[in-house]
Image: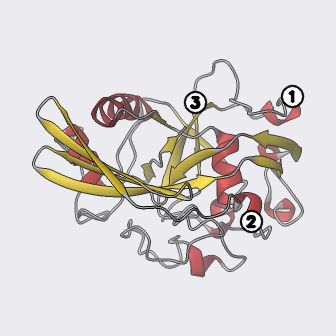
Amino acid sequence: MKQLLLMTFLTATILVGGSSICMAQENPEKQTITVQNNGMTVSFDMIYVQGGEFWMGATSEQSKAAYDDEMPSHRVAVSDYYIGKTEVTQALWFAVMGESPSQDEDKWSDDYGLGDDFPAYYISWNQISYFITKLNGLTGKKFRLPTEAEWEYAARGGAKSQKFKFSGSNTIKNVAWYVDNSQPVAHKVALKTPNELGLYDMSGNLFEWCSDWHDDNYYKSSPVDNPKGPQDGYMKVLRGGSMNMSASGCRVSYRYSNDPGDVYYRNGLRLVCE
C-alpha cells in the first residue's frame, strides 16, 4: 500500500451545464467526489486499490462450496485503480439521473428499502452505461464498472487480504446482509464491518454488476494480466450475493449473471475509477 501522504486539501468547483461539481483532492488512499446536480449535493468515496497478483476463483477457503464456473483457481494480476467504498446509493443515482430507474412495477420502495443512503437497485447493466456516461460528463473523471477480476481482488482485500471466505470475515453475519438476517430487503450502505480495504457490503446486500460477459468456462483460458472476460456473450457478470441469497452465494468467488437488459430488486452497482 502506498505511504499515506499528508497534504492540504484542495477543492475545485467546476460548472458543467449549470451543475457544479466539487472535487476534493486528497491523499492517494481515498478520493472524495461531491456531485451537485438536480437540486442535490451528494458525496461519495473512492478507495485506492494497489494492484497486484492473486489467486482468483475456488481457492482453498472457497472450495467446499464452490461451483464449476469458479474453477479452476488461477493466477491473475490487476493494475492500480479506485473502487467505491460503498454501492452506488439512491441519492447519487438520483443526483446524476434526476429520477429513479422505475420500470412498470419495478421501483424503489419501502418493500425493498427506500432512502438516500440505501443502495440503488432495479438497475440494468444497460442503464448503468447511461448513468456512467452522465457521471463522467459531470465530473470529468473516468468512472466505469469493475472487471470481474478487479471486483474479486477488492472483495478479497487486495494486497491486505487475510484470505477470508466472505469479504472481510469468515463469519458472514459480521459483514453481510443475507437471507438469514435481512428480512430480506436491502439495508443502508456501510452498516456492517468493512473488509481489509475499508470497503462495505461486498458480500450481501445487493448483487453488483461487472463489465464482463459471463462464460462458465472462462477461467480455463483466462489471461493473467488484467482479464476483461470473453469478447462477447449473452449474460453479464454479477458479484457479491444479495440480501436474499444464502451464505454460499455471498462468498468472494461466487459468480452470477443476468441479461444486461434485466432489472431486479437485488441488482445494483459499485463504481471503479482509473
Give amino acid for label 3.
Answer: Met
Q: Is residue 88 above or below residue 193?
A: above
Q: Nearer the viewer, mark 2 or mark 3?
A: 2
Q: Is residue 120 above or below residue 134?
A: below
Spatial separation of the CA atoms under disc 2 and disc 3: 31 Å
Q: Nearer the viewer, mark 1 or mark 3?
A: 1
Residue plotted at (40% across, 36% down): 124
Residue 84 spot, x, y in % from top left: 48, 53
Residue 47 spot, x, y in % from top left: 53, 56
Which residue carries the number 2 mark?
160
Residue 153 in view, yes or no: yes
| Residue 174, picture quadrant | bottom right
Q: Is residue 274 above or below residue 55?
A: above
Q: Which mark is residue 235?
A: 3
Q: Nearer the viewer, mark 1 or mark 2?
A: 2
Q: Which mark is residue 221?
A: 1
Spatial separation of the CA atoms under disc 1 and disc 3: 18 Å
Q: Earlier in the sequence, mark 1 or mark 2?
A: 2
Residue placed most toward the observer, 240 or 7: 7
Q: Residues within 10 Å of mark 3 (few under 14, many from 20)?
A: some
